[in-house]
Amino acid sequence: MISKGAHVTVSSPTSNNVCETGTCSYTALRFTDYCQIVVSNTGWLTAFVDHSQYLANRYIAFGATLVDSYYPIYHMHSSLAGANLVLSTFLKGLLCGRSPLAMYVKNTTASITGSCI
């Protein structure tokens, strides 16, 4: 598709509950490295959003009590409030990075909580 001019955005996997042990911590999975390799090997028409890191940063800032409330059943699938946070961190990554999808995001970078990485 890239040979036909498609712009591709590759995202690291979405983090699970990084606070489920009571202490919030995050280490990138090997898949994040794989995503970065793919982007570096495919050239300027690809962009990388480290969604896992953006989300983990917000979770760590919020702390275990709030983050645990986003996962009412188990560590993988969040509540609606958690899903909204997952979405906002992905949008933050698009806006902070060089993805061509950023021009289609209605929010401004400043309107989404968190820092660019």
Image (cartoon, rainbow, N blue to C red):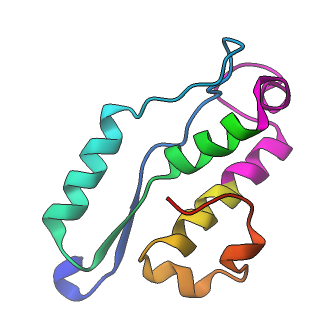
- Image: magenta residue range: 62-86
- The part of the image, by quadrant, that contains residue 58 is top right
Q: Residue at x 69, y 32 (%)?
A: 77
Report how many numbered discs are placed on residues in the image: 0
* Most foreground residue, 19 or 14: 19
Position of residue 23 in the picture relative to residue 7 (left or right): right
Q: Position of residue 107 (x, y in %)?
A: 73, 79
Q: Position of residue 62 (x, y in %)?
A: 78, 37
Q: Residue at x 34, y 80 (%)?
A: 7
Q: Residue at x 25, y 88 (%)?
A: 5
Magenta stretch holds residue 81: yes
* Most foreground residue, 26 or 77: 26
Position of residue 97 in the picture relative to residue 41 (left or right): right
Q: Quadrant of the N terminus?
A: bottom left
Q: Position of residue 51 (x, y in %)?
A: 52, 51
* Most foreground residue, 78 or 102: 102
Q: Classify 19 as above or below 42.
A: above
- The part of the image, by quadrant, that contains residue 38 is bottom left
Q: Position of residue 64 (x, y in %)?
A: 77, 24
Q: Classify 56 as above or below 74.
A: below
Q: Residue at x 14, y 63 (%)?
A: 41
